Image: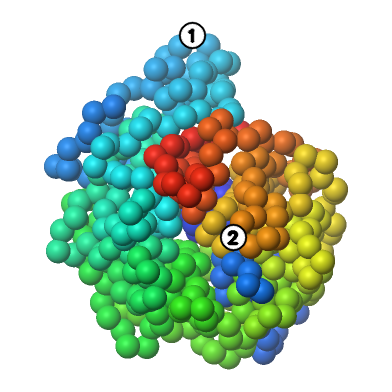
Amino acid sequence: MSLRFASFAAVSVGLLLTGCPLTDHYQLLQQGAAGADTAGSFGSLAGGEKSVVDAGEPELGGAPSVTAGTGGSEPETAGKAGCAIACSTGRACEANRCAGGWVATAPPPSKLVARSKAASVAMGNAVFIWGGLDNDGAGLANGAIYEPRRDTWTLLPTDPGSPTARIMATAVWTGNGSNKVIVYGGTDASGINTYKDGAIYDPLDNSWSPLPINPMTSKRSAPFGYWDGTRAVFFGGLNGANMVAAGDRFDLKMWSVSTNMGDPGPLGYSAIAVDGPAMFLQGGVIGTTRQDKVYTYTSSTDRWASLSKGPSVRTGAFGAWDGAHFVVWGGQDDNGLRNDGKTLSGTVWNDMSASDVLSARRIGFRRSGWAFQVEPGVIAMLGGQTSISGSSGGLASDGATYAIASEEWTAIPSWPSQETHEYGIGVWTGEEFVIWGGRDQNVSTLTGERWAP
């Protein structure tokens, strides 16, 4: 199966910030790591950092379609002479190829207000959005599903089982098999009270049910989340100003807590990627000390292992799984922003070629910066923070793709609106990257745009 499967969103399973699994899971573990688990550390947050120093409105009567090419009106380019494929709305088709680049998303329904710090994930080729912070500083308890192929929005229901209002929660899609979205954690609008609860959305009956409570699970704001094929894993995150160690796992029936054998504790802001049940991290920070260590956690066996070191000490690097390699680029060290990187295959790290199209930058924790596999052997990096001046740092609106075999960089132009989309949602669906909402000039926006290669 191609990279349309896991935590980085895809047509078959789902996305959350970087990397997607194939059927040949554990490539890095099979080829390397000496087959031995070692007591060591592991990253706790999804590739970003705060600072170590510092059209008509859809009805609610039914669930939205999330399968490719079904439901809604036929894309306008379908059936055009010379085309045997249907392109998403707004993309021309010539010689059986849909046009790439950026196009604007349709405006959302009026009941979906502008927001930042919402939970999001790809569910099939659609984008799920829930919660967030409105312009008045209030937490939101509503959301919608956006379908790029039809360029349509469908409001999500609010019922007794839906999550309470929250910001910085994490959403995980469980894939086509069970076809659920799990929303977990986050905080209230003030950021003071951190949650350890959530809810499950079922698109088949368009309803919510609350997550069961487990006293062993941790309160987590903005944990990294992914579906490993049988369970959702929520790792790291924050509880107030403190990083949270270990992970909580939910198999749609009960919770379990990851082993602490080999768990490094509260290591945060690592480059991160996922290949099925295997999660890879590089770098990060413990306390105020940046790291260069590399770790993996295999959720199916609940085991930690350390891998050979590669990139230098850094935090907030972009991380992605390209189908066969763990890719780490950029980030920040004690001297400033980085514009270099390496790829790991087995136990061997190889330098990435220097880029003349992508400036030095880091992922700002849930603020800006996304990395994902476009196709096997090709990853994309978009956005990110181009300054180390904390909350006042500049945010990029451009990016680039990198082909591992040819070591070729290709620029991705800035998204058309030039809005920063600070704390907006960014989701790769396996076909298009959708960026929506967030703040621009400290005001939440309803603007959205989507990119295809």
Return the residue nearer the eye: 190 or 180: 190
Q: Is residue 81 above or below residue 235?
A: above
Work out whether 452 lies above or below 166.
Answer: above
Give yes or no for contact between labels 2 and 1 (Cβ–Cβ under 8 Å): no
Q: Residue at x 50, y 44 (%)?
A: 440
Q: Nearer the viewer, residue 133 or 26?
A: 133
What mark, if any, has residue 118 been given in the picture? Answer: none
Few, some or many C-alpha atoms within 10 Å of disc 1 (few <14, some 14-19, many ≥20)? few
> Circle 2 sits in a helix, a strand or a loop, which is it?
helix
Q: How many marks?
A: 2
> Which element carries disc 1, helix, strand or loop?
loop
Q: Amino acid at mark 2?
A: Ser
Dot 1 corresponds to which residue? 81
208 with respect to 291 (left or right): left
Is residue 193 among what the camera can see? yes
Q: Residue at x 50, y 35 (%)?
A: 450
Of residues 229 and 133, the one drawn nearer to the viewer in this rendering:
133
Disc 2 or 1, which lies upstream in sequence?
1
Residue 155 vs 331, above or below: the answer is above
- Amino acid type for the residue under numbered disc 1: Ala
- Quadrant holding the C terminus: top right
Residue in view at x 26 percent, y 53 percent: 142
- Residue 377 is situated, as x and y percent measured from the top left of the image, at 70, 47
Residue bearing mark 2 = 391
Position of residue 86 measured from the top left corner of the image (x, y, whole percent): 44, 23
What residue is drawn where x is 63% and y is 72%?
A: 54
